Amino acid sequence: MEIIRKIFQDKFARVAFIVLLLLYLIILFADFIAPYSSTYSNREMSYAPPSQIYTIDERGKLTRPYTYNYVREFEPVLMQTVFKQDRSKKYYIRILPKAEGYKFLGIIPTHRHLFGVDKGGELYLLGTDINGRDVFSRLIFGGRISMTVGFLALLIVFPIGLIYGGISGYFGGIIDTLMMRFAEATMAIPSFYLLIILAAILPSGMTSVQRFALIVVILALIGWAGFARVVRGMVLSIKNEDFVLAEKTIGASNLRIILKHILPQTTSYVIIAMTLSVPSYILAESGLSFLGLGIQQPDASWGNMLKEAQEFTNILYRPWLLTPGVLIFIAVLAFNVLGDVIRDILDPKSRKRI
């Protein structure tokens, strides 16, 4: 509670915390918030622009928000396909309308969504992609992968790094030397090229869930070594403290000393490292998916959604396809700002500045 209180005292950290909280709440309730499912597709609406929402009617009076459907036409002068609004019928935006069925939080079957339009209407807040899929809905579902990959990797990295570094630093000597040489050899493995090789030899029939799990495991099994080295250095300075010597005197086992008395002293660093490590995993997953080595279509992640925006014509004429890159930037920046403030709070040398 003290950490949270100090976070909210810093205006930048407060904004970063609120932004991350909103992002995780949105992806948690993605099925409810998204107007369409992750599998929805309307090929006739390929690259449709964002729907225009009106609150003023033809007579200039305030009215309920409404929109018009798009009609796809070929423009002979421009020699290209254009989208024009069909103003013959209005479609009003509704709160909690019935739409595609899903299970709320994966448990409760329901057809209610946060918002939508009248039956027969189409609402694309951020336009559509090449397959006519709603970009806004896919952003929310894609965030489930991009925003959780870091925490799943940490579940592997930190237990291994803590125990490995704790044992190495506590025992020292030849055990420490051998364990650290192995950690350095692990750090020398080029993870990016390893993933490229694996992508080439893995069966093409692997599902995105299997690829996602593989990405998490590989990033984690390579990333633990650097964390273990830092923990080992901290343990070297802690193991000669009086409370550790007292535990040895009363006959406590080495495992108990490491787990109960030494590793808890590294809590401040662990919290800081966790906060600052998540952005790197978000960027790693997004980069791999952007290159086609991670999550595959039709499943969504911010990385493979951003891949479609790399074409020059899409950047110029369909800027809504760049939205995943904006969200990646916001999420990574928020994590870094929050991590820096937490480091200042937990670092004894910087507490005077808080």
Image (spheres, rainbow, N blue to C red):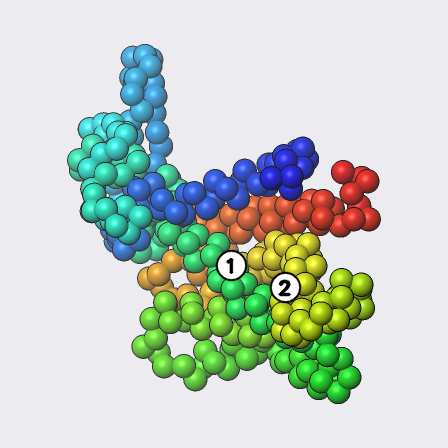
Disc 1 element:
helix
Say left or right for 267 vs 79: right
Residue 314 visible in rendering: no
Q: Quadrant of residue 100?
A: top left
Q: Position of residue 334 (x, y in %)?
A: 60, 45
In the foreground, 321 or 199: 199
Above or below — where is 249 with respect to 62? below
**Viewer-nearest of discs 1 and 2:** 2
| Residue at (41% x, 47% y) in the render | 27
| Residue at (31% x, 24% y) in the render | 65
Above or below — where is 27 with respect to 157? above
| Residue at (63% x, 70% y) in the render | 256
Say left or right for 352 vs 271: right
Q: Position of residue 1 (x, y in %)?
A: 60, 39
Q: Residues within 10 Å of mark 2 (few under 14, many from 20)?
A: few
Q: Label 1 is placed on what type of residue?
A: Phe
Q: Residues within 10 Å of mark 1 (few under 14, many from 20)?
A: some
In the foreground, 264 or 62: 264
Q: Residue furthest left?
A: 119
Which label number is shown at residue 260? Answer: 2
Mark earlier in primary sequence (1, 2): 1
Q: Label 2 is placed on what type of residue?
A: Lys
Q: Quadrant of residue 168?
A: bottom right
The C terminus: image quadrant: top right
Above or below — where is 300 with respect to 61? below
- Residue identified by numbered label 1: 151
